[in-house]
Amino acid sequence: MADRDRPAKDKNQEDVTPDVVLDWRQPVDAVTAAGTAFDRTADEAEREALREICDLVAVERMEAHFTVKPWRKTGFSVKGRVSADVVQACVVTLEPVAQTVDEEVDVKFVPAREAEKWRERPDEEGEIVVDVEAEDPPELYEGNALDLGALAAEYFALGLDPYPRAPGVMFEGAGEAAVPDADEERQKPFAALKDMMKAKDKGGD
């Protein structure tokens, strides 16, 4: 998936700790100059959590394979893939539909203390100009570890088919009115993840 397909960050959104889904962390002091491999396979409990949050029939396999390298002076580059075998319900008949998630990941992280350095600033006319060709701003991390579980869960959710359909099944009626908005549908699993993280964070568990 291209980075431009990722959901835009809400800079006013309350920070949460998404490790309630996948508690996978990479200590930054263990990252070598040549790169450190980070390979995880979700266990049964983790797959069940993803299944429930993303409203799936089943998550049969979910893996993340990343290479973490130092980036610039204080940051880190995370490249790799998130893959999974899932079963979704057909949006028309509710029949189980086997699907594969295979998402490319290329994300940078910098310490949260550097947030101001990467903040978008308005131009002379007060407009914030977005360069679609420019590299995405880095993610922020706190403490001494990168939360790669949250990153993997995000790409897992974004890689799900928003319109799972059994073979040969068509939407009833013709025209675009019968088809939900693709971008909106694609964000639903990711939004569910964020809602679950917020509830957990506020509960103090």
Image: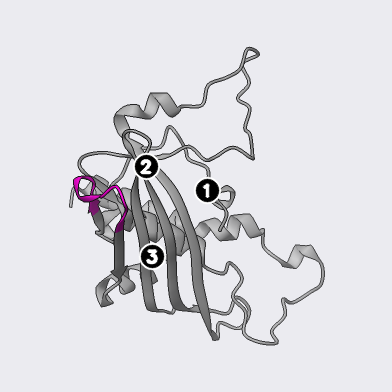
Q: Which amino acid, mark 1?
A: Pro
| Residue located beneath label 1 in the image | 7
Q: Would you say 67 lies left or right of 10 here?
A: left
Residue 12: image location, x then y, percent: 42, 32
Query: Is residue 142 a member of the stretch shown in magenta?
Result: no
Q: CA distance from mark 1 to mark 2?
A: 17 Å
Task: Tell me if label 1 and label 2 are in contact, CB under 8 Å.
Answer: no
Q: Residue furthest right?
A: 175
Camera-near label (2 vs 3) is: 2
Q: Secondary structure at mark 3?
A: helix
Residue at point 71%, 66% (across, down): 179
Q: CA distance from mark 2 to mark 3?
A: 26 Å
Q: Secondary structure at mark 2?
A: strand
Q: CA distance from mark 3 to mark 1?
A: 18 Å
Residue at point 61%, 17% (across, down): 123
Residue 135: image location, x then y, percent: 54, 40
- Label 3 neighbour load within 10 Å: few <14, some 14-19, many 20+: some
Which of the labelled discs sits on residue 53, or is there none?
3
| Marks 2 and 3, the one that precedes in the sequence | 3
- Label 2 neighbour load within 10 Å: few <14, some 14-19, many 20+: many
> Which residues fall within the magenta stretch?
26-36
Q: Nearer the viewer, residue 54 or 202?
A: 54
Q: Which amino acid, mark 2?
A: Phe
Residue at point 45%, 78% (across, down): 86
Residue 154 visible, this angle? yes
